[in-house]
Image (tube, rainbow, N blue to C red):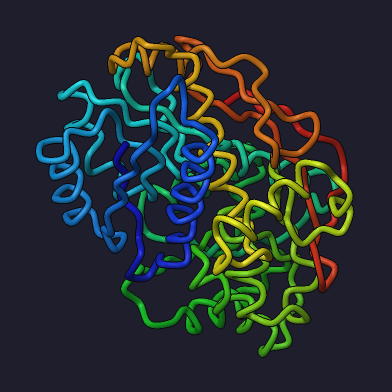
Amino acid sequence: IGQTMPYSGPASSYGTIGKAEAAYFAMINDQGGINGRKIKLISLDDAYSPPRTVEQTRRLIEEENVLLDFSALGTPTNTAVRKYLNEKKVPQLFVATGATKWGDPQHFPWTMGWQPSYQTEGHVYARYLLAKMPNAKIGILYQNDDYGKDYVKGLKDGLGDKAATMIVKEVTYETTDPTIDSQIVTLQSSGADVFYDVTIPKFAAQAIRKVHDLGWKPVHLLNSVSNSVGSALTPAGLEASKDIITVEYGKDPTDPKWKDDPSYKDWSAWMDKYYPSGDKTDAFNAFGYNEAATMVQVLKQCGDDLTRENVVRQAASLHDFAPPMLLPGIAINTSPTDFYPIKQEQLAKFNGKTWELFGEVVALNK
């Protein structure tokens, strides 16, 4: 199995996902593998750079002869290789990005997402604001690419006709920017009382810190791809992160409510044995664990028919599969016409130490 991961560059905090997945497969191999076969994961660094992703993915397919591309991280990076992988008829499975485009079996039958789509997450925040702050003035910071734009579209679609009056300022950043301080100052001066923060962890930490240092007190909505306590909130300062709102679909490892949960105990023991250098406060290590568990389930369903066609067929026939570190009540379901495995999320607020879930589990259409 092949994948590309940002082990270096601006998104390197996500690299731990690849390390967690390798550790999960090591555990499976120690248990005898799947149907008598061992998994070999070849994980290459693409530094979150699309040209490098193209180069490394070609190497995986044409030189390493991998069966499939698994959990490659990033919207711009996966976009750069989607056409190539579909033309080669190589499964591009459970990409580690929530862009809505990954659920398009009609046009890209070899590509499937895993996590909830960014647009639907935007809908969840919109629903919350319309209910709690219908006269909010929203300032938006987003990454200037498909990932950022997807989140903004979701929020605007969710707000409907009110988007034009509620959104008072939108600013962007590039992954090559050293800081986003000036963007935060611009948003504060716009009079916004809601901050919609669509950033990767490096810039999320900067944004949280700058908002705090300015004494600005907006309702801070932080996208789920940066809600890891270990990789975003701790670097920003836990006190500075207090009262931020996000969505969750996995069990956050910092939440004490899971301490006696058998699945959490198994995950913690696995971290100790297979990834002892990993950070147990980093939700990305639970993310990688869940994604790898999903991949293992697909391979189990394949039996001895390990053709690329059957791999995709089995990925598109998951029924109520619940990886151990997903929230209770959330399960994976796919079909030949539904390439959005996870379609449920729940709001959470940071109390200065951990995320506290609130409200109901929201079922999403896509």
91 up-or-down from 26: above or below: above
The quadrant the C terminus occupies is top right
* Image coords of residue 238 (percent x, y): 74, 78
Image side of residue 222 versus residue 179, left or right: right
Residue 168 visible (yes or no): no
102 up-or-down from 217: above or below: above
* Image coords of residue 229 (percent x, y): 67, 67
- Image point (45%, 40%), residue name: 99
Image side of residue 41 versus residue 339, left or right: left
349 up-or-down from 68: above or below: below
- Image point (63%, 29%), residue name: 343
319 or 186: which is nearer to us?
Answer: 319
* Image coords of residue 232 (percent x, y): 60, 70
Q: How many marks?
A: 0
Image side of residue 229 versus residue 313, left or right: right
- Examine the image and state in which quarter residue 208 appears: bottom right
- Examine the image and state in which quarter residue 52 appears: bottom left
123 or 21: which is nearer to us?
Answer: 21
124 or 57: which is nearer to us?
Answer: 57
- Examine the image and state in which quarter residue 277 appears: bottom right
Residue 51 visible (yes or no): yes
